[in-house]
Amino acid sequence: MRNAFVLCCSIALMGAIGTANAQDKPADWTKSKWGPQDEIGAANYITPELVVKAASLVKTGKTYALGMIIDSKTPAYPPRSFKVTVVQPGQAGNPGLGPNKATYNDDIIEGWVGVGSQLDGLGHLGVEHVYYNGNKVADFADPTGLKKLGIEKVPPLVARGVLLDMAAYYNTDVVKEGTAFNSKEIEEVAKKQGVEIRQGDIVIFHTGWLSLVGKDDKRYGAAEPGLGVDGAKYLTSKGVVAIGADTWGLEVLPFESQNVFEVHQILLAMNGTYILENMNTADLAKDKGYEFLFVLGQPRWRGGVQGNINPIAIR
């Protein structure tokens, strides 16, 4: 599993040598439309009025957990790992605390935040050590936490969610790796489902890819279907807040060109658009839940780059 990740990324990186300027990026991409002090990017699109409209989508009260269950065996981008240790501190050799013999369990997490279902913050990926709104890594990244763009700055993400069922679009259970979703495919599947992508939306792709976890981890980590460069530019032009998928990296892999994680750069660094990875979309797709209320209160770890999440879709 891990070897597959390393091999895939090594090939992409070797192909990228000498192509640092090959990316087509706007000259003013380091300046946010929300001003030089902005740290929340596309979350600015969420307004009280849009939240009220999104809440009106709730008709049945059915809820969907979009976060996957994770443990020490969950495949992840190397060298990431995750482990939970349960302890009973100070309780060895005694029947409990006080006359009522109270006992308790605590847990310790050892691992990386970027395992399983996760939110990529705006300080996660940049271009030549420059990140969203022109923040230079030397000025804001510190081993003790990000001084800017920390995950704690992200406001509650409550918005209209749109599911694009790419597996149904391609008439398959699992979309083939290397399949790119660009403006043509996005427009066609949205039209087929009868949904419109609007400013302030959170768009999530269903590909069936997450079903490989525990069954074919090697294939899951070696590549994936996903968002293409043109698709990323199309969705950011629509003013969406976040884009996610039931894949480990959201964007198509192998990459469409020699550029490495270019979709991440377009979304996070250039537009302040958040990324949601490893979303559990199977039940939502099964019920054809193409529009829903999306609710996420992310962990507020000061200076964090990413966050383990369990967003809720409500219909």
Image: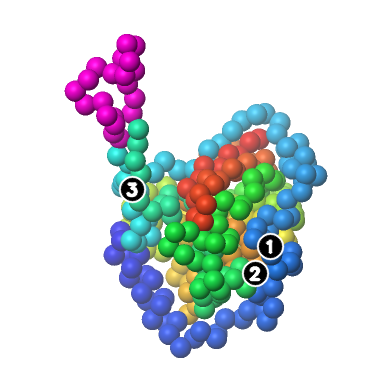
Residue at x 76%, y 48% (from the top left corner): 47
Mark 2 element type: helix
Q: Position of residue 187 (x, y in %)?
A: 69, 60
Drawn side of residue 225 relative to residue 27, left or right: left
Main structural element of the magenta stretch: helix, strand or loop?
Answer: loop
Q: How many marks?
A: 3
Whether residue 126 appears in this view of the structure is no
In this picture, is 181 found above or below 168?
A: below
Position of 41 relative to 27 (above/below): above
- Residue highlighted by disc 3: 110
Which residue ends up furthest to the top in the rendered image?
Answer: 99
Q: Amino acid at mark 1?
A: Asp
Q: Which residue is mark 2?
A: 133
Residue at image location 30% in from the left, 35% down from the top:
86
C-alpha gap between disc 1 and disc 3:
32 Å
Left or right: 222, with 189 as reference point: left
The residue where tag 1 is placed is 38
Q: Which residues are magenta?
A: 86-105
Residue 24 coordinates in the image, percent (x, y): 61, 81
Tell me the amino acid under the disc marked 3: Glu
The crowding category of the residue bearing disc 2, from other C-alpha atoms within 10 Å (few below 14, some 14 to 19, many at least 20), is many
- Sooner in the amino-acid sequence: mark 1 or mark 3: 1
* Nearest to N terminus: mark 2 or mark 1: 1
What amino acid is found at the position of numbered circle 2 in the picture? Asn
Local SS, label 1: loop
